[in-house]
Amino acid sequence: MFDNLSESIVQEALKWLDTPWRHQGRTKRGIDCAGLIIRVGNDLGLIDYDVSHYPRDTRRDTFINHFKMNMIQKSILEKQAGDVLLFRAGIYACHCGILHFQKTQPYLIHAYVNYKKVVNEHLTKELCSRVTHCFRFPGVA
């Protein structure tokens, strides 16, 4: 086991690296960004829900509401390893990933359609500028 729950979240997410991207996927054969969060949370026993039948291009607050109902919202300024960050594309939040740090540098583990797989990507200033919300899994200090 790992030293703390935040580290366990990161390690669980890293197990999904290179898994192919697939809209609404929930298996090693294919997963999307929301599926990655759901599987990590389910596999660690932190959450027990799933969501399905959502469009690839979210509108309004439907994507955000899923997180608000099932996770703990916190300030973006207080983000920590193991937190879930939501990102906008255009006006609405429609993407998410798990934050962690490598040698003090922020990274994001996320299933990204542009890369067609789960990646561990440096959280650049451009990507940071698109962060809209920060959530913590229930039970994580």
Image (tube, rainbow, N blue to C red):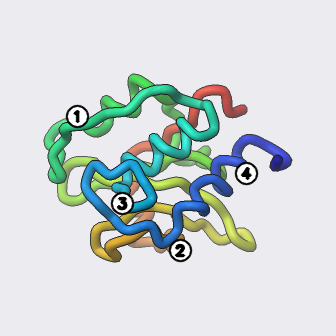
Spatial CA distance of label 4 from label 2 is 18 Å
Residue at the location (82% across, 47% down)? 1
Q: Secondary structure at mark 1?
A: helix
Name the amino acid type tagged 4: Glu
What residue sits right under mark 2 in the picture?
Answer: 122
| Disc 1 residue crowd, few under 14, some 14–19, many 20+, Cα 10 Å | some
Spatial CA distance of label 1 from label 3 is 23 Å
Residue at the location (66% across, 27% down)? 139
What residue sits right under mark 4 in the picture?
Answer: 7
| Res 23 → quadrant | bottom left
Name the amino acid type tagged 1: Thr
Work out whether mark 4 precedes mark 2 in sequence or the reverse, and give the earlier one.
4
Q: Residue 62: give its label.
A: 1
Spatial CA distance of label 1 from label 4 is 29 Å
Q: Residue 30: give its label.
A: 3
Q: Secondary structure at mark 4?
A: helix
